[in-house]
Image (cartoon, rainbow, N blue to C red):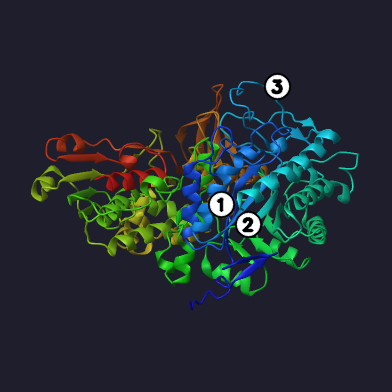
Amino acid sequence: MKTKFERLFEPGKIGTLELKNRIVMPPMGTRFYGLWGEVTDTAVEWFRRRATGGCGLVMTGVAYAATAIDALRSTPNALRVDDTSYISGLSCMAEAIHEGGAKAGIQISPGGGAQAEGTPWMPGLQADQTVAPVSPSGVPGVGHTLPGSSLKQPRVLTIGEIRQIIELCGMSAGNVKTAGFDLIEIHAHGGYLIAQFLSPFFNKRTDEYGGSLDNRCRFLMEIVAATKQAVGADFPLTVKFSIDDALPGGWDVKQSQTLALKLEAAGVNGICISSGAHGTKMPASPTYVYPGGIFVPLAQAIKDAVRIPVLVGGKLNDPQLAEKTLRDGKADFICVGRALIADPDWPQKVANGQIEEIRPCLSCNECRQAGHRGQPVRCAVNAAAGKERRYDSIQPAEVKKKVLIAGGGPAGLEAARVAALRGHQVILCERYEQLGGLMLLGGIHNEEITAFTEWLIAQIKKLPVEIRLKTEVTPALVEKEKPDAVILAIGGTFVSPQIPGIDRDNVFSSEDMLAMMHGRSLNKGVLFRAMAPFAKHVITASMVRRLLGSDFPIRKRVAIIGGQFPGCSTALLLAEKGKKVTIIEESDLIGRDMEANTMAVLKAEVRAGNVEVLTSTRVSEINDEGVVIIDAKGNKSVHETETVLVALDLAPTESTIATELADKVRELYVIGDAKSFLRIRNAISEGYVTAWTL
């Protein structure tokens, strides 16, 4: 197959393992496993689907190898390999990957150590507070992600327990080989147990497992030796570790290069690059606030030290960037993770030159956030992800229907796409002159949202969908068109606080920004009124991002009313542009609905003094000096600022249209923000499922 991505599709080897290309699906948590850590049919089909998309190597998520000692789950519904009873299910998973055309790898871990925040592996002991996490030295973990969880004070592992963990890891590796996997990777990153032994931040031991670099590496090196003894010297083995854990006095690039040499000498066949520790600003799964290829310089540092293959990910979902990374000799294999959740056919589409057909990943970490809530993995843009057994295949409808859809936002666009693919006659109505809805606004924060919006619209335009812009769905239109089904995806309503001064020229809301992008006039001075006729043609998300770096319309000092996702995301963007930002939130906590890794970045900005947070505080007035605020004790003060932004959640639209249409159409559905304000994931899922079941 000829392709301009020659290096991506060049065969490669990791040890004795031959791979058809250089694309690797890295380990990612899914929460698809059973109560005891056993494989489920959902997990089998998940990996089968990713394998059929064209990867050379598909890695399962982390599998725990020593639960007898590290007795707390790091995450709910995780995979286990530390008993022969798991071999049967593991075999089904490896077999599915092979049937999909890929080689099968699995990542094993001795445990989460001080980072473990889940319940005991023994079911029914959720309320048992006596089971403590384990650690090298009793240093607590640095961050937690599960709702309502807290990191307990860990206990210190004894020498005997350390040796037992090493033995269990070897035994577990033997189980994996017996199950039919082609490669094992040892999990040594993210601030979990092995990473804690490596890092001076966590490891304060004074025995043979602490102190010098050799001693701190000993735990990992002995696990490597036990693994190789169990599976044989020629069995492919890689190690994934953080090149810099982003902790004060912790693990760094120089120590990583030394470790890489040790691993190479010990017969390890490859090194997978990671960074940071969970809870630090630099996470293993970088979100939309980071540039693509952020781990490539770390990969280059390891390539400079060793001759064995280096695998790297970290937002390398742009095929051109992935190809360049290989061509420049900065890595040997490219890990494509979240992009394969968004579009399992990413490799095939790249190979066929169908780049524009790839469903873009938002790097929003919704897939991770679902897991942090104890739920199975879900995707913001791929409603079938994790539900492959039911929804992956879009089949022609047995009865073709005329479907009228109100609203061209994410829910309406996805409903139109899927309904048209099923053969229905689709009319999509949008009251403004542009499709996209709130995603037009979301693209200001996250460029990938703009890319996804453009992808959705392009898909719609390739299908027999009749698009009617500047058209509202009314009872009269329904009576005229006589559809079999109406889908109301009319979006939510912006919430505007009733505060004196809210209409001042220096106060802007999300509604104002979206109105400007639609070409509607803003009552914010002569310039904004004059811009209205042209704004819809020139005001794009990328242009607004550029404007935020200037003093117009957002000045240097900014107060944001609202401290949940819209406000926190806005604060991050403005801090990046050099603004001095204050978040004002009435409740006692900001970012309740914000993804953990992105929240870690915001906390870093707070620590750096770029963002100030005022919780349990409300704004009572906006005046010439700034905002008048009242704290929890009733104290009133003036917070000086130049610009005020209102960034609150939406409310469902208070429309009577659903009631008016109830007796005029056989099938009526209300979806997306019109029903309840959640996230893009919910809008896409409801649009997909509604159209899939029509």
Q: What percent of the width, then of the height, locates residue 478?
A: 13, 46
Which numbered disc flags the more N-terminal residue, 2 or 1?
A: 1
Q: Residue at x 69, y 65 (%)?
A: 16
Q: Is residue 163 left or right of residue 95?
A: right
Q: Which mark is residue 130?
A: 3
Residue 104, visible in the rendered structure: yes
The number of discs equals: 3
Foreground pick, 19 / 624: 19
Q: What percent of the width, then of the height, locates residue 87?
A: 61, 43
Q: What percent of the width, then of the height, locates residue 650?
A: 38, 39
Secondary structure state at the residue bearing disc 2: loop
Q: Is residue 64 left or right of residue 454?
A: right
Q: Which mark is residue 94?
A: 1
Secondary structure state at the residue bearing disc 1: helix
Give the residue number, with chain letter if any, for mark 2: 182
Cα separation between marks 3 and 1: 37 Å
Locate the C terminus and report the quarter of the image it occupies. Answer: top left
Secondary structure state at the residue bearing disc 3: loop
| Image marks 2 and 3: residues in contact by CB distance under 8 Å | no
Residue 509, visible in the rendered structure: no
Disc 3 residue type?
Thr
Cα separation between marks 2 and 3: 39 Å
In this rendering, the label closer to the viewer, 3 or 1: 1
| Image marks 2 and 1: residues in contact by CB distance under 8 Å | yes
Which class describes the residues within 10 Å of circle 1: few (<14), some (14-19), or many (20+)?
Answer: many
* 414 over 130 or under it: above or below: below
Which numbered disc flags the more N-terminal residue, 3 or 1?
A: 1
Foreground pick, 540 / 29: 29
Disc 1 residue type?
Ala
Query: In which quadrant of the rendered view does residue 114 lie?
Result: top right
Disc 2 residue type?
Asp
Q: What percent of the width, then of the height, locates residue 155?
A: 78, 29
